[in-house]
């Protein structure tokens, strides 16, 4: 036999083997009692059995594109085969699960299992599983002190009627566990209805005439777990804590996977009673006395509020024991803090360290006091929290989901203008009347000034009382103003940013700070505040990049729009009228496009 004959013989053998494999595969497809087809490596259907018409109403499927028929790509078929994924499609009023096997030729044998009854049962289970909800009437105690008994009872009865009516619509069992708290259980499908209506009960309660100069509102926390009712209760408790910690007038839904927020249209109301400040001051004093080391830490890229609060807490610690080992953790000092930081360094009273050095110094019996943030991912040195024996959190921002885990003591009041205000109140219950040095009083006043836009927003009676105390303690307002002075270059950048602002019909102003600026956070916030002074502007958004390449965005509003919710969706947070966010991935232009989309959704 010559070479050509041998080659022809080999080719014929390969053809026969391949043909045999294909015939076996086709036979396997045709013999299946379920709708089955073979999808080749090119994504085309090569053959299908007689039952396939239960899935697809076509005379012939051969050479038709599988993706066009099902919306499922070839890579997905491979993933179903290798990872045993559960994927379904809906066809002819039936639900089919895809079962995938690989053939010897590299094609896929796809079987469609009718799971309609199973899926309907699963959906019925999901729709009817129990959700636990907790409702709290915000400002209930405050109302008791502001109006007559007759007015109060009328308002409360109206609100209870609204809650009862809403619970009946939700098919819920409702129990009043306290004068201002309710517990309810309802099916999941009714929760979807409440979400679709954006928890209209919040608006109804807010519109009730209380006879006072403020409205009553509701905080709603809902928990849903697939595991058990104990976990559902834990999630519900966490959800109501989040709603209250964020200032109330909102609904928070917590599941095993995520947390969602609805409402939040009013500012947290200032409490006239300072009893909590006194309790916190005493508890903090005990923790300080029991600790060998104390580390005071703010958020990354500390601002005036974080730095001023750190100096105030330093003084509280020194009052307890002059010989205490106290360290203020500041890893980066931006341009806006340079003057006050250098003034503090020159006094040689304070011990400063960056996060790395603080980690080297921390011992077993250390107390870490976190100021102006409560988010573990935002602190200057997150690793320091892991090594601390006790943690104290003092903050004025609305509560976020990534709250620092298991703090020994926390003072989180979203009604406060600034953390400096809270620290100042604690100072008043910590010792003698005059205990601050001049720089500390000025730093605290500077923190309050910057966070209130020079006492123009988010100020209450307690804000001015705290400012008056700092003034009596030696704070010079002229010196405070000096801390806010900017250089000529930054002034030009701000002016150009304001000049380049774009205005939209909805009362929205947006601007982008060009280039990379060291002090971009201060520039953004200042420009955003300035844009709000223009008639017709209800909310402003300003984005820019720092020298590390991080995009920073500041958001401000007059209260008509909750900018906190918008910033949270970008990974940030803040308050109803003042918020911000940062992004490592998005450019200022890209983040502004995201903001436009989010504003339209509100």
Image (spheres, rainbow, N blue to C red):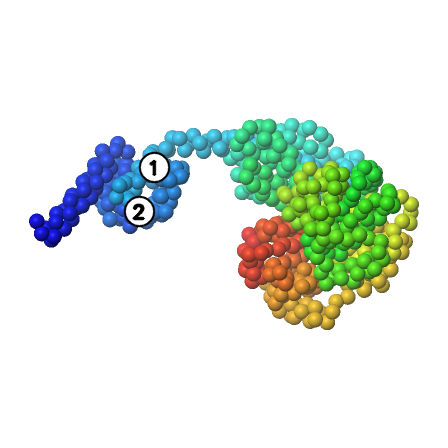
Q: Please, what secondary structure does the residue beneath circle 2 have?
A: helix
Dot 1 crowding, Cα within 10 Å, few <14, some 14–19, many 20+: many
Residue at which label 2 appears: 66
Dot 2 crowding, Cα within 10 Å, few <14, some 14–19, many 20+: many
Q: Residue at position x 78%, y 44% from top?
A: 294
Could you say which is closer to the camera, residue 489 or residue 196? 489
Front disc: 2 or 1: 1
The answer to whether 121 is drawn above or below residue 412 in the figure is: above
Classify residue 255 as left or right of residue 564: left
Count of numbered badges drawn on the protein:
2
The answer to whether 130 is drawn above or below residue 532 in the figure is: above
Could you say which is closer to the camera, residue 184 or residue 471? 471
The span from disc 2 to disc 1 (Cα, nearest Å) is 14 Å
Residue 506 locus on image (x, y percent): 60, 59
Classify residue 417 as left or right of residue 549: right
- Viewer can see residue 168: no
Q: Please, what secondary structure does the residue beneath circle 1 have?
A: strand
Precedes in sequence: disc 2 or disc 1: 2
Residue at which label 1 appears: 99
Q: Residue at position x 71%, y 60% from top?
A: 334
Q: Which residue lies furthest to the left in this view?
A: 1
Residue 354 locus on image (x, y percent): 72, 53
State the image quarter where residue 598 is shown. bottom right
Q: Residue at position x 87%, y 43% from top?
A: 321
- Viewer can see residue 288: yes
Residue 195 locus on image (x, y percent): 55, 41
Classify residue 94 as left or right of residue 387: left
């Amino acid at each position: 036999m010559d070479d050509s004959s041998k080659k022809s013989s080999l080719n014929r053998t390969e053809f026969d083997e391949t043909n045999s494999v294909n015939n076996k595969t086709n036979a396997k497809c045709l013999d299946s009692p379920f709708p089955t087809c073979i999808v080749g490596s090119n994504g085309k259907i090569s053959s299908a059995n007689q039952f396939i018409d239960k899935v697809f109403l076509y005379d012939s499927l051969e050479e038709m594109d599988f993706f066009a028929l099902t919306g499922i790509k070839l890579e997905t078929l491979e993933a179903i085969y290798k990872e045993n994924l559960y994927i379904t499609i809906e066809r002819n009023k039936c639900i089919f699960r895809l079962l995938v096997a690989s053939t010897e030729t590299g094609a896929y044998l796809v079987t469609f299992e009718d799971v309609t009854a199973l899926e309907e049962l699963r959906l019925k289970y999901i729709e009817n599983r129990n959700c636990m909800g907790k409702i709290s009437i915000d400002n209930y105690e405050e109302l008791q002190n502001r109006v007559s008994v007759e007015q109060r009872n009328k308002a409360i009865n109206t609100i209870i009627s609204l809650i009862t009516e809403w619970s009946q619509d939700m098919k819920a069992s409702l129990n009043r566990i306290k004068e201002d708290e309710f517990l309810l259980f309802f099916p999941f499908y009714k929760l979807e209805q409440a979400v679709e209506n954006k928890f209209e009960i919040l608006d109804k309660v807010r519109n009730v005439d209380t006879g006072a100069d403020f409205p009553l509102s509701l905080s709603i926390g809902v928990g849903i777990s697939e595991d058990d009712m104990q976990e559902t209760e834990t999630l519900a408790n966490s959800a109501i804590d989040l709603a209250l910690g964020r200032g109330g007038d909102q609904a928070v839904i917590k599941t095993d996977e995520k947390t969602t927020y609805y409402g939040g249209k009013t500012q947290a109301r200032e409490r006239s009673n300072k009893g909590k400040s006194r309790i916190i001051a005493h508890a903090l004093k005990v923790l300080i006395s029991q600790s060998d080391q104390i580390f005071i830490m703010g958020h990354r890229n500390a601002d005036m509020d974080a730095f001023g609060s750190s100096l105030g807490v330093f003084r509280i610690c020194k009052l307890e024991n002059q010989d205490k080992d106290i360290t203020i953790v500041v890893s980066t000092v931006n341009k806006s803090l340079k003057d006050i930081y250098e003034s503090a360094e020159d006094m040689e009273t304070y011990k400063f360290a960056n996060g790395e050095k603080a980690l080297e110094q921390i011992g077993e019996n250390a107390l870490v006091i976190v100021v102006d943030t409560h988010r573990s991912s935002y602190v200057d040195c997150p690793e320091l929290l892991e090594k601390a024996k006790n943690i104290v959190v003092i903050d004025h921002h609305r509560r976020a989901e990534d709250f620092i885990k298991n703090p020994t003591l926390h003072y989180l009041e979203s009604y406060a203008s600034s953390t400096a205000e809270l620290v100042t109140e604690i100072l008043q219950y910590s010792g003698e009347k005059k205990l601050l040095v001049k720089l500390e009083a000025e730093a605290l006043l500077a923190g309050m000034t910057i966070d209130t836009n020079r006492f123009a927003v988010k100020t209450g009676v307690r804000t001015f009382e705290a400012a008056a105390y700092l003034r009596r303690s030696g704070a010079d307002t002229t010196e405070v103003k000096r801390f806010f002075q900017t250089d000529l270059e930054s002034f030009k950048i701000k002016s150009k940013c304001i000049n380049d602002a774009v205005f939209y019909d909805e009362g929205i102003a947006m601007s982008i700070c060009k280039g990379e600026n060291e002090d971009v956070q201060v520039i953004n916030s200042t420009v955003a505040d300035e844009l709000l002074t223009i008639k017709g502007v209800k909310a402003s958004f300003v984005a820019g990049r720092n020298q590390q390449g991080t995009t920073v965005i500041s958001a401000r509003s007059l209260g008509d729009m909750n900018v906190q919710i918008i910033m949270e969706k970008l990974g940030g947070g803040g308050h109803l009228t003042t918020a911000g966010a940062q992004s490592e991935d998005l450019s200022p232009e890209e983040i502004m496009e995201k903001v436009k989309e989010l504003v339209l959704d509100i």
